[in-house]
Image: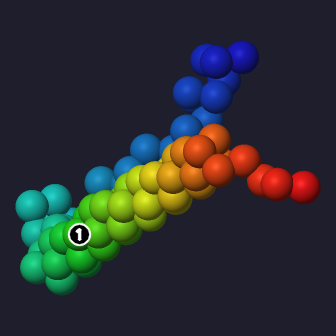
């Protein structure tokens, strides 16, 4: 079965005169990837800060609840 799939896979046509070294993303592609990378790093840092803040608030509420039990 694998032999049939490999035999049916088309190979690139040699009649296309494409210079493989000239087909690059260039400066625009580099800047796009740089932007996505920086945005991802900033989002992760912001998420970490927010998760820590929520965790510390929860710990503080637990401490206050233990020190001052509700009087009902």
In the rendered view of the protein, which quadrant contains the C terminus?
bottom right
Q: Using the rendered view, name the quadrant where residue 18 is placed.
A: bottom left
Q: Colour scheme used in the picture?
A: rainbow
Q: Is residue 30 above or below residue 9?
A: below
Residue at (16% x, 59% y) in the render:
20
Q: Using the rendered view, name the quadrant where residue 9 is placed.
A: top right
The number of numbered discs placed on residues in the rendered structure image is 1
Q: Is residue 36 above or below residue 6?
A: below
Task: Report whether 61 appears left or right of 26.
Answer: right
Q: Is residue 52 above or below residue 32?
A: above
Mark 1 crowdedness (10 Å alpha carbons): few <14, some 14-19, many ≥20: few
Residue 22 visible? The answer is: yes
Provide residue 30's location: percent of width, then percent of height.
16, 72
Provide residue 53's location: percent of width, then percent of height.
44, 60
Task: Report whether 12 appears left or right of 63.
Answer: left
In the rendered view of the protein, which quadrant contains the N terminus?
top right
Q: Is residue 66 above or below residue 41?
A: above
Q: Secondary structure at mark 1?
A: helix
Residue at (56% x, 27% y) in the render:
6
Provide residue 52's location: percent of width, then percent of height.
42, 54
Task: Report whether 47 appears left or right of 23.
Answer: right
Q: Residue furthest front?
A: 71
Task: Report whether 67 appears left or right of 14.
Answer: right
Residue 62 visible? The answer is: no
**Which is nearer the eye, 38 or 27?**
38
Mark 1 highlights which residue? 38
**Which is nearer the eye, 6 or 13?**
6
Provide residue 32's location: percent of width, then percent of height.
25, 77
Q: Residue furthest right?
A: 72
Residue at (17% x, 78% y) in the render:
31
Residue at (65% x, 50% y) in the render:
68
């Amino acid at each position: 079965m694998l032999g049939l799939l490999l035999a049916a896979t088309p190979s690139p046509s040699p009649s296309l005169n494409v210079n493989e070294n000239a087909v690059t993303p260039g400066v625009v592609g580099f800047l796009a990837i740089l932007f996505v990378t920086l945005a991802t790093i900033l989002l992760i840092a912001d998420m970490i800060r927010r998760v820590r803040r929520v965790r510390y608030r929860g710990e503080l509420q637990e401490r206050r609840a233990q020190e001052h039990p509700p009087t009902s």
